[in-house]
Image (tube, rainbow, N blue to C red):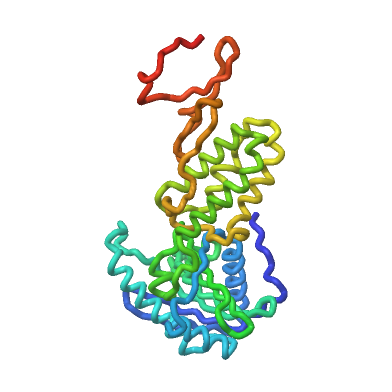
């Protein structure tokens, strides 16, 4: 049974609006909400709780102080509530943007539509003496009414698919923090750029470099303790960051580090602490938990390993499955050797049977 954290006692709901968006008929209808509607209040608390624990978010900032959203935010803060004209204007704007987006990209979806039907929730609240704005696009779900078994459409309660934008105001009423949330792996561009008119707070280049530098720094203490594990984990991390596409940092940590089985027994106890430090990197190193990788921003290119005073081994720091291409072994007479799987240049060295 899933449990939901109770909303903090310091949270005070100031104002709420709900608009139903009908893309087919191009209508934006404001719903009547009674002041004692505890169900909607509880629903909003659940949304806010889900948003607060969701790792899929990225920092943004207003692109200008004169955008429709920026001017609406100023009105909302001054009135400590959702001014009707501003709230309706934002809902109507979302409808226009979704109609345009659907017309542009709807043919790419097998269902013939790109935007899911839904409603636009907005509310202002105070928490820990700070004023907050939250705008949420909640998708509609079909369900059977238990009273008459008729199919109806409404807001999903147990399965919420949504996009959200949360703004925290400073003491002077200026946006202090703007976060965008999306159930998609990467926030939809129409949602953050076209509708809210935001710009990304941190570039993909910054996120890529700050993240991988932080990861390698966390691994450095095990370089002498567990050199084999260090080589494997370092290479795996750098390889992941030199790919193209988007990166979900928590998922990356789980994939590369959380379930890793150390070769060095001494690393078994210390690895969980290292993994925890890596998980905290987005906050410590100030980068987004989700971003598009910029491989050129990875500062690690080649690894040079001194094999002896006469020979060094050099390889690219993004070798996929490195353990299958370079490994250590012993000859039958006990000599330590490094084996390199050679697809080229093997004929440049004298052949010797393994003995």
Residue at image point 53% right, 50% down: 212
The residue at the point 61 percent across, 85 percent down is 172
Measured as percent of width and height from the top left, residue 283 is found at 61, 60
Q: Nearer the viewer, residue 33 or 56?
A: 56
Residue 182: horizontal and vertical position, in percent?
A: 48, 63
The residue positioned 59% from the left and 37% from the top of the image is 230
Relative vertical location of residue 246 with respect to residue 46 in this rendering, above or below? above
In the rendered image, residue 169, in percent from the top left (x then y), is placed at: 59, 79
Who is closer to the viewer here, 153 or 252? 252
Vertical order, 271 against 130 (above or below)? above
Q: How many marks?
A: 0
Q: Quadrant of the N terminus?
A: bottom right
Residue at the (49%, 44%) spot, across then down: 238
Q: Nearer the viewer, residue 301 or 207?
A: 301
x, y percentage for residue 102?
A: 32, 68
In which image quadrant can residue 27 be found? bottom left
Quarter of image, res 229:
top right
Q: Is residue 311 left or right of residue 172?
A: left
**Quarter of image, res 351:** top left
Q: Which residue appears farthest toward the front when viewing the image?
A: 310
Above or below, 275 relative to 196: above
């Amino acid at each position: 049974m899933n449990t939901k954290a109770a909303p903090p006692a310091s949270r005070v709901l100031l104002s709420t609006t709900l608009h139903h968006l009908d893309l087919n008929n191009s209508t934006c209808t404001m719903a009547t909400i009674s002041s004692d509607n505890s169900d909607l209040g509880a629903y909003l608390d659940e949304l806010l709780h889900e948003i607060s624990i969701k790792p899929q978010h990225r920092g943004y900032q207003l692109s200008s102080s004169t955008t429709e959203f920026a001017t609406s935010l100023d009105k909302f803060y001054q009135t400590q509530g959702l001014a009707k004209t501003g709230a309706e204007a934002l809902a109507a704007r979302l409808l226009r943007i979704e109609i345009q987006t659907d017309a542009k990209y709807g043919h790419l979806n097998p269902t013939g539509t790109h935007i899911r039907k839904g409603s636009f929730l907005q509310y202002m609240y105070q928490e820990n003496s700070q004023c907050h704005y939250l705008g949420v696009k909640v998708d509609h779900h079909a369900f059977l009414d238990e009273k008459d078994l008729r199919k109806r459409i409404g807001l999903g309660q147990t399965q919420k698919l949504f996009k959200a934008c949360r703004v925290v105001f400073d003491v002077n009423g200026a946006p202090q923090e703007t976060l965008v949330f999306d159930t998609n792996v990467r926030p939809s561009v129409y949602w953050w750029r076209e509708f809210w008119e935001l710009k990304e707070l941190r570039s993909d280049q910054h996120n890529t470099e700050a993240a991988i530098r932080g990861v390698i720094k966390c691994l450095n203490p095990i370089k002498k303790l567990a050199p084999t594990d260090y080589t494997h984990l370092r290479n795996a991390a750098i390889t992941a960051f030199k790919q193209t596409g988007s990166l979900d940092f928590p998922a990356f940590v789980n994939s590369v580090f959380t379930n890793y089985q150390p070769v060095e027994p001494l690393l078994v106890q210390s690895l969980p602490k290292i993994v925890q430090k890596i998980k905290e990197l987005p906050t410590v190193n100030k980068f987004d938990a989700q971003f598009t990788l910029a491989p050129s921003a990875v500062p690690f290119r080649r690894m040079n390993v001194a094999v002896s005073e006469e020979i060094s081994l050099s390889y690219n720091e993004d070798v996929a499955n490195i353990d299958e291409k370079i490994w250590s072994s012993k000859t039958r007479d006990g000599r330590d050797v490094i084996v390199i799987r050679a697809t080229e240049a093997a004929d440049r060295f004298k052949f010797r049977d393994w003995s």
